[in-house]
């Protein structure tokens, strides 16, 4: 669970205290990086930096102390994700380099490990869920946001988020049980 900061840290950041900005970044950055990486952004690190540039430039408008700042931060992260999806949808598909047809190349150790992780485990199981189910679980578990915060980010009621989370967890449970039965 990420470190919760006292509300006076947000107030200090709003007054321009550089140390407060550092503490806020240290508390929120791991969750933002994780959220953007799991959502599949090609440049999740760059997107995370954009999130914090936006958050810090608009910190004076944040209300609700640290919890309000967390909600605002993940709202910005979600917007960056949506922007990336829209950008990719508008971009033409470029035929890129195909390593399978190039006999001169050998996969790096990093590529081999990342490919093996991507084809097993929770990432593959999450991809079997509907996009809104994936979103609610990522915001609740990876970002550690409350039901109310997730509802605000996703533009839904708290009750619908509860229901969506319940259905997502039941679906994930059935996927795991099905996979265990096959083993």
Image (tube, rainbow, N blue to C red):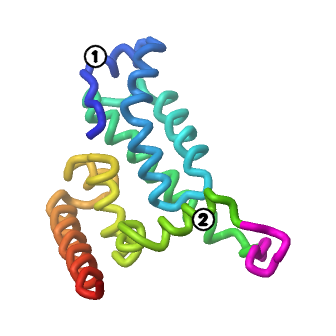
Relative horizontal placement of residue 139, taking residue 107 as reference (left or right): left
Point out residue 84 in the picture as x, y percentages from the top left corner.
Answer: 57, 59
Residue at the bottom extreme, as displayed: 182
Q: Which residue is drawn at 70% across and 69% down?
A: 91
Point out residue 85 in the picture as x, y percentages from the top left corner.
Answer: 55, 64
Q: Can residue 55 be seen in this view?
A: yes
Q: Which mark is residue 8?
A: 1
Element marked by disc 1:
helix
- In this rendering, is residue 63 above or below 131? above
Residue at the right extreme, as displayed: 104
- In this rendering, is residue 106 above or below 84? below
- Residue nearest the viewer, comparing 57 with 66: 66
> Which is closer to the viewer, label 2 or label 1?
2
Q: Residue 72 carries which label?
A: none
- In this rendering, is residue 88 above or below 145? below
Q: Does the magenta stretch include residue 44?
A: no
**Circle 1: is it few (<14), some (14-19), or many (20+) Cα within 10 Å?**
few
Point out residue 131 in the picture as x, y percentages from the top left corner.
Answer: 38, 71
Q: Name the residue under label 2.
A: 112
Q: Magenta span covers which residues?
A: 95-106
Q: How far apart are marks 2 and 1 (CA)?
A: 46 Å
Question: Which corner quadrant holds the C terminus?
Answer: bottom left
Q: Identify the image quadrant of residue 63.
A: top left
Q: Identify the image quadrant of residue 65.
A: top left
- Residue nearest the viewer, comparing 1 with 70: 1
Q: Residue at x 26, y 30 (%)?
A: 4
Element marked by disc 2:
helix
Q: Which residue is drawn at 48% across and 73% down?
A: 119
């Amino acid at each position: 669970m990420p470190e919760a900061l006292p509300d006076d840290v947000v107030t200090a950041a709003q007054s321009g205290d550089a140390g407060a900005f550092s503490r806020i970044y240290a508390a929120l950055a791991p969750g933002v990086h994780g959220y953007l990486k799991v959502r599949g952004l090609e440049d999740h690190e760059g997107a995370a930096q954009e999130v914090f540039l936006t958050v810090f430039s608009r910190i004076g408008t944040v209300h609700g102390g640290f919890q309000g700042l967390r909600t605002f931060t993940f709202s910005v992260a979600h917007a960056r994700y949506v922007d990336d999806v829209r950008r990719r949808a508008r971009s033409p598909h470029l035929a890129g380099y195909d390593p399978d047809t190039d006999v001169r190349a050998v996969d790096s150790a990093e590529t081999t490990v990342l490919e093996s992780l991507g084809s097993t485990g929770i990432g593959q199981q999450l991809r079997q869920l509907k996009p809104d189910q994936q979103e609610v679980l990522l915001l609740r578990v990876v970002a550690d946001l409350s039901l109310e915060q997730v509802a605000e980010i996703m533009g839904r009621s708290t009750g619908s988020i509860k229901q969506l989370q319940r259905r997502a967890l039941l679906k994930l449970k059935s996927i795991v049980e099905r996979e265990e039965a096959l083993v």
